[in-house]
Amino acid sequence: MNIDSKTNLYCVFGNPVSHSLSPVMHNSAFCHAGLNNVYLAFKINDIQAGIMAARAFNVQGISVTIPHKISIMPFLDEIDPGARRIGAVNTVVNKNGKLLGFNSDSLGAVAALEEKTDLAGKKTAILGAGGAARAIGFGVQEKGGHVSIINRSADKGRKLAHDLNAGFCPLSDFNSAGYDILINTTPLGMTPDIESMPVKPDTLKPGMTVMDIIYNPLETKLLKHAAAAGCKTIDGLSMFVYQGALQFELWTGEKAPVDIMKKTVKQALGIKI
């Protein structure tokens, strides 16, 4: 990678971001495509200040992660209709000085889920009520799935359930009986807090499909217990790569080198290829 005065800057805004593999994934894709771009991770608490800095430094593209996927929206110039319907943004494109918001989480999650299961008619419990939960809930519903939001905060959970016209259950009352799919969108179990999990092990029933959008570690404590309980499991790698590939294409207008991106992330996670 040769960085010079003509290098374009891309980045991820979030808190935390120390665990993020977005830089290694996107930098490998930029290098493979021969693009003079660099991608960095920025820990951002004040998203308005972050957007002001992005404008000042002419950042060409931003990945948006926890906790800013919803709060970033008022500070952008335009929101893609799909992201507007979802109510969350995880991708920002700088188009001639205008910052445009998109959502690649929904399509990325659906692609990862459909590798392992059909969604139409399935009852899906989504743990969490943030931007990722919102995007995934929307995507599952578009494929004909039935969604319930499971969240510790009743107010936040009920609001998302209302927005999606979905069911709601407080996390303390959750029982997985009757659900076909369970998706964790919370950070519980993510590096460095790898011993946490969002539900108790006895909640997991044989035959369920359990997906965790966390990719670091790849096998979270939730997925370990799910596999032991006889569930079909989906780790966060596929969603992460698919949503990242869509970001790459929105930023560059070029076809994403998906195989290179996936290989790079696996190597960074220490997975044998």
Image (cartoon, helix red, strand yellow):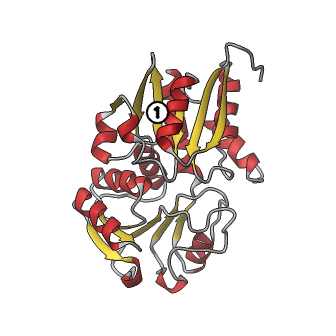
Residue drawn at x 68%, y 51% is 18
Residue drawn at x 49%, y 34% is 51
> Which of the 4 quarters of the picture holds residue 36?
top right
Residue drawn at x 34%, y 40% is 83
> Which of the 4 quarters of the picture holds residue 234?
bottom right
Q: Residue furthest top?
A: 6
Q: Position of residue 78 (x, y in %)?
A: 34, 29
- Look at the picture and state if 179 lies above or below 163: below
Residue 150 shows in this picture: yes
- Left or right: residue 166 versus residue 51 is left
**Residue tagged 1:** 92
* Residue 236 vs residue 88, the one in the foreground: 88
Q: Secondary structure at mark 1?
A: strand
The N terminus, quarter of image: top right
Residue 123 shows in this picture: no
Count of picture labels: 1
User: Which three-letter amino acid code belongs to the residue tagged 1?
Assistant: Val
Q: Position of residue 2 (x, y in %)?
A: 78, 19
- Look at the picture and state if 135 lies above or below 201: above
* Residue 89 vs residue 26, the one in the foreground: 89
Residue drawn at x 51%, y 45% is 46
- Left or right: residue 150 versus residue 252 is left
Residue density around tag 1, few if under 14, some if 14–19, many if 20 or more, within 10 Å: many
Q: Position of residue 264 (x, y in %)?
A: 71, 41
